[in-house]
Image (spheres, rainbow, N blue to C red):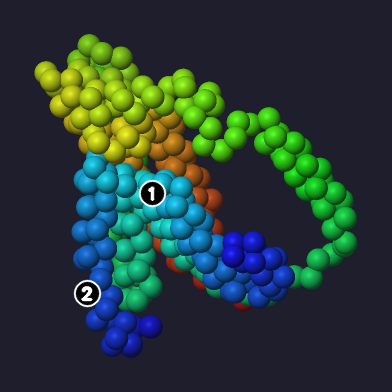
Amino acid sequence: MKREPVLRVVGKLLTPYMLVFALYVQFHGDFGPGGGFQAGVIAAASIIFYALIFGLPAARRLVPDAVVETMVALGAFLYLTVGFAGLALGGNYLDYFVLDRDPVAGQHRGIFWVELGVLITVAGVMLKIFYLFAGRRRED
Amino acid sequence: MMAVTVIAIILQRNLFSVVVLAGVYSFLMATVLVALDAVDVAMTEASVGAGISAVLLLGALYLCGGEEAKPMARPWLPLAVTLVILAALVYGTLGLPAFSDPLSPIHTHVVPRYLLQGPVETGVPNVVTAVLASYRGYDTLGETMVVFTAGIGVIALLRRVRRGKGDKT
């Protein structure tokens, strides 16, 4: 598909908007529909879209394997860290009320970081699975 | 329309069209969920069911060919098992409260508290996000761990194949 000019132009135009939309879904999740999981899937889908049009090597140059594998672990680690932060500040595990002097602001902060962790892990796992599937060659 | 799609999926022998029809099914399901006011779930269904899984299934088709194999034997026993389970499930739904019954247990126990206190306690207008990330933080932690473990499992399974490419037997 690399030679198709229409696909290349549309792909170049759409990929940044898809990434921005993922961020919108992520940070607007407090007010509208959305959240870490959906945003992660949309972010991964934009990279997969890019890979389908420009080829897997181009996508691998854009988001290398090492970055993806780090994302898989980093998101889960971030979530756990938020839990321990609540513990360190004198609350229960995953207790957000103690993260800020104002309990409501603390809730906001906790939800923000937790959703960010979910986003990173989900996007990383989806991309990694796609890379591994698409990187294999046909047996025959 | 969803029933028509499912029957078409069952009858179809070409796996490429099965994947496309599964995507159609996911979008119809998302529409149903929007109609039920579950926009968050609809979003997930549309992006995961119709987007990512369709791409992954197409990738799998590329690896293993696009025609379904003819069944080896008549599937009477699996059919019987499925029918028995279906009957059991339908029997189970008879005991559930009626759809959108305001007096059913889920609407009297914890839901009013989430709906009334959630925006006040967390400052988050979207109750789904508040419940998901705050009240049910442990559950979401578990889900993230499930996704994480799935990723690790896929890496562990498929990486080995790639490394063993040199000494192919």
Q: Position of residue A78 (x, y in %)?
A: 28, 34
Q: A117 or B95: which is nearer to us?
A: B95
Q: Look at mark 1 in the image and give the residue it sits on.
A: B39
Q: Position of residue A118 (x, y in %)?
A: 33, 41
Q: Look at mark 2 in the image and give the residue it sits on.
A: A13
Q: Secondary structure at mark 2?
A: helix
Position of the N terminus of chain B by quadrant: bottom right
Q: Residue at x 36, y 34 (%)?
A: B132
Q: Residue at x 40, y 33 (%)?
A: B140
Q: Is residue A76 visible?
A: no
Tell me which amino acid carries mark 2: Leu
Q: Is residue B157 visible?
A: yes
Q: A100 or A63: which is nearer to us?
A: A100
Q: Are marks 2 and 1 in contact (CB under 8 Å)?
A: no
**Is A10 left or right of B107, judged from the image as shown?**
left
Tell me which amino acid carries mark 1: Val
Q: Residue at x 51, y 61 (%)?
A: B28
Q: B121 or A135: which is nearer to us?
A: B121
Given the image, what chain letter belongs to the residue carrying mark 1? B
Q: Is residue B132 above or below residue B20?
A: above
Most distant residue in the left direction: A101
